[in-house]
Every structure is written in C-alpha cells, then in structure tokens.
Image (cartoon, grey):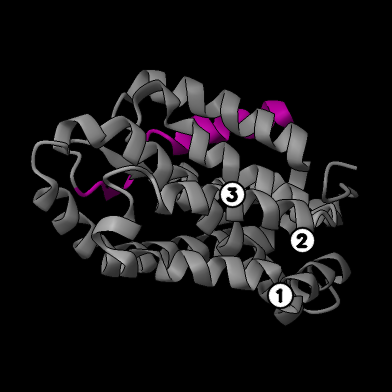
Amino acid sequence: MVCCFAPLCTIFSLWSLFPIIGAVGRFIKVATVLAPLVGIILGPYLGTFAVALGGVAGTSIAQTGPFGPLSFVPWAATAVCSGLLYSHKQRTCVVLYAAFLLVSTFYPIVGPAWLCPSFVWLQLGGLAVLASPLQSKAIESLRRQTSSLEMIFGVGVTCFTAAMFGQVVGSLMYEILYQPTFISDLNVWKGNLQILTFIYPVERVIITAMATFLGVPLMKALRAFGFKIGGR
C-alpha cells in the first residue's frame, strides 16, 4: 500500500491547487487533499512515510512547492495528525497542534500576534474542534461506518482538523523561510496576513470537501476488499 500511495502523492504534488500569497510562482499542491486520507488509511507511521516519499519525489520534479524540497513537510504533518487521530491518540494531536500554533503565532517580529492577531481565528477553531468530543465522535463514526452520513461526518471532521494542523505547520515554515524577504518592510507582510485571514479558511474548506468526496468511496472500496483502515 505504501508503494501504491507514494506514487499517488508524487502525481498529486505535481498539480497546483492555490497560489501562495507573498511567494510568486509557488503553489499549494493537490497532495494537500490526499495527505489526510493516506494518514487514516495507512496509519501515522506508514502513512507519513508514503506521503513524505511521494512528496520528495514530486517536489524534486515540479519545484514549485512553497518550501522547495521541504514542501512535503506540511503534507507529512497532516498525515501524522489524521493517522494519530484514527489510532485514538487525540491528546497527542492536541499537544502537537497547540505547540506549533503557539510558536507560529508568537514567532519573533513576523508572528500574527504582533502584526495581525485575527489571522489565527480558524487555527484556534481547528484546535477547539480537535480537542472537543466532536473529534472523538468523528473517529467513532469513521470506524463504525454504519451509514454514508456517518462516514462523511467522520472523514470530514478528521480531514478538517488534520488539514488545519498542516496549515499551522506550513505557516510556521513560511515565517521561518520567508521572513528574510520581508523583514525590511513589515507592512507588506502585515498586508499579506490580512489578506490571508479571509483566504486560507476558504482554501481549507475546499481541501476538506475534496478530501471527503475522495475519501469516503475510497475507504468503502478498500474495506470491501478486506483492507483494514488504519494500517492494521
């Protein structure tokens, strides 16, 4: 299954989904949609390995990811989160999410806490969902799969929180790697954050919808052929 999903991640990482504000010629890739599904299907370890392997291959070919050769890292983080959630390690995900969010928000000079606090509103919302009983119910619904509605609910909520975790990790990487470009003009960075405050929630909703649309029939098909979701 790793040998199947890694090439899929490579192919998906060649296709652009959204342009990156403040990084001309760089794009969010369609692999962002596949990553949380791979984490659920293969588990946190094999899933992350498949996403990272495919992502490295894809970014070495396309070279239009937001972080160059490291563009696979947010996708791998997404797979880690969704895989851990399906493995009933919700608390671990909450700690990881909160830690990365804290560092990203208060990153020196260019962190949203200093320039645009409203930027983190949906990131905080993702953390709230992740830590709530809603996430636990989503995983139980995903495991039971007694109806299509339960499956849609389980995949949707889990992919949303995992995608938000990937976005938080990506935000931190953006701050680290792009800060030298904007440090002389913080007004430009602040303007980008103000624009992104309204754009990235739309992106994450679209990513969640696409992952749910793709993931529900995929997981049903795998289970019909006897594959145990979660890498076990």
How many neighbours does mark 3 have within 10 angstroms: few (below 14), some (14-19), or many (20 or more)? few
Q: Nearer the viewer, mark 2 or mark 3?
A: 3
Which tag, 2 or 1, sits closer to the chain's start?
1
What residue sits right under mark 2 in the picture? 220
Amino acid carrying mark 1 in the image: Ser
- Seen from the viewer's position, the closer of residues 196 and 20 is 196
What residue sits right under mark 3 in the picture? 99
Q: Which mark identifies residue 132?
A: 1
How many neighbours does mark 2 have within 10 angstroms: few (below 14), some (14-19), or many (20 or more)? some
Q: Are marks 3 and 1 in contact (CB under 8 Å)?
A: no
The magenta region covers: 1-21
In the rendered view, does 226 fall on the left or right side of 182? right
For the question of whether residue 15 can be seen, the reply is no
Q: How many marks?
A: 3
Q: CA distance from mark 3 to mark 1?
A: 17 Å
Q: Residue at x 75, y 32 (%)?
A: 46
> On the image, which quarter does residue 77 sit in?
top right
In reply to whether residue 15 is colored magenta, the answer given is yes
Q: Is residue 132 above or below residue 74?
A: below
> On the image, which quarter does residue 1 sit in?
top right
In the rendered view, does 79 fall on the left or right side of 68? right
Q: Position of residue 160 (x, y in %)?
A: 56, 64
Amino acid carrying mark 2 in the image: Lys
Quadrant where the C terminus is found in the figure: top right
